[in-house]
């Protein structure tokens, strides 16, 4: 298989179009559910929220692993250029849409199900804000790697790889246990 076939600008445009189509299908699905499943609409929104969270978290777990390997790749090498494409597409095609959908559906559920009440909910939202900060830090790293800018060490990225995991654990405990 030709490596350039997957890493070309045309392939990147196709991936972006697919992401926009997927978001459009997602919005259409929500509209159809609202019209045809009004009694279980809240449950559908919860299910779609969980799917979006899983997609976002998968990217947050995988992207720093790519950074670890990219750090060891020589600047300008085929390997480095391939990592740039992988990182950029993961961020733009999966992580950014998943984060936006997570936030939109999460805020809807917080309003509809809990009227934004509960200490556990406020703590959860604060932790999701921190998770979003991690996402933004990773986005900046994608840009820095893409510009062959200064790189952090592989050790730094190994430590940063733990941040989404720790935040996810705390968020899940807050949602399931609702300790306060």
Image (cartoon, grey):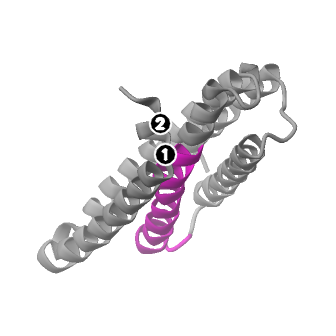
**Direction right: furthest residue:** 150
- Residue at 74 percent across and 19 percent down: it is 72
Q: Position of residue 139 (x, y in %)?
A: 68, 50
Q: Which residues are magenta?
A: 88-116
**Toward the viewer: 173 or 32?**
32
Image quarter for residue 169? top right
Q: What element does badge 1 sit on? A: loop
- Residue 16 appears in the picture as rendered: yes
**Toward the viewer: 116 or 24?**
24
Q: Which residue is mark 2?
A: 4
Determine crowd level at label 1: few under 14, some 14-19, many 20+ residues with C-alpha closer than 10 A: few
Q: Main secondary structure of the magenta part?
A: helix
- Residue 169 appears in the picture as rendered: no
Instruction: Pick the quarter of the image with the N terminus.
Output: top left
Q: Which residue is mark 1?
A: 8
**Direction left: furthest residue:** 36
Relative height, residue 2 to residue 92 (above, below): above
Picture mark count: 2
24 in the magenta segment: no
**Toward the viewer: 45 or 138?**
138
- Residue at 58 percent across and 62 percent down: it is 118
Q: Are marks 2 and 1 in contact (CB under 8 Å)?
A: yes
- Tell me: 62 left or right of 176: right
**Toward the viewer: 58 or 39?**
58
Measure the alpha-carbon separation of dots 2 and 1. 6 Å
Q: Position of residue 45 (x, y in %)?
A: 32, 63
- Residue at 62 percent across and 58 percent down: it is 125
Q: Position of residue 28 (x, y in %)?
A: 25, 73
């Amino acid at each position: 298989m030709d490596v350039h076939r997957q890493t070309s600008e045309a392939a990147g445009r196709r991936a972006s179009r697919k992401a926009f189509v997927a978001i459009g299908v997602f919005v259409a699905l929500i509209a159809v559910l609202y019209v045809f499943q009004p009694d279980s609409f809240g449950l559908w929104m919860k299910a779609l929220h969980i799917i979006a969270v899983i997609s976002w978290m998968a990217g947050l777990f995988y992207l720093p692993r790519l950074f670890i390997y990219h750090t060891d790749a020589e600047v300008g090498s085929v390997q480095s250029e391939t990592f740039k494409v992988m990182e950029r597409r993961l961020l733009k095609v999966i992580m950014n849409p998943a984060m936006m959908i997570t936030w939109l559906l999460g805020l809807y559920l917080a309003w509809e199900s809990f009227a934004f009440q509960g200490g556990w909910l406020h703590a959860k939202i604060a932790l999701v804000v921190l998770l979003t900060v991690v996402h933004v830090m990773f986005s900046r790293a994608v840009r820095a790697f893409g510009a062959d800018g200064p790189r952090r060490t592989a050790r730094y990225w190994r430590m940063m790889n733990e941040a989404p995991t720790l935040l996810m654990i705390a968020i899940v405990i807050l949602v399931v246990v609702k300790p306060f």
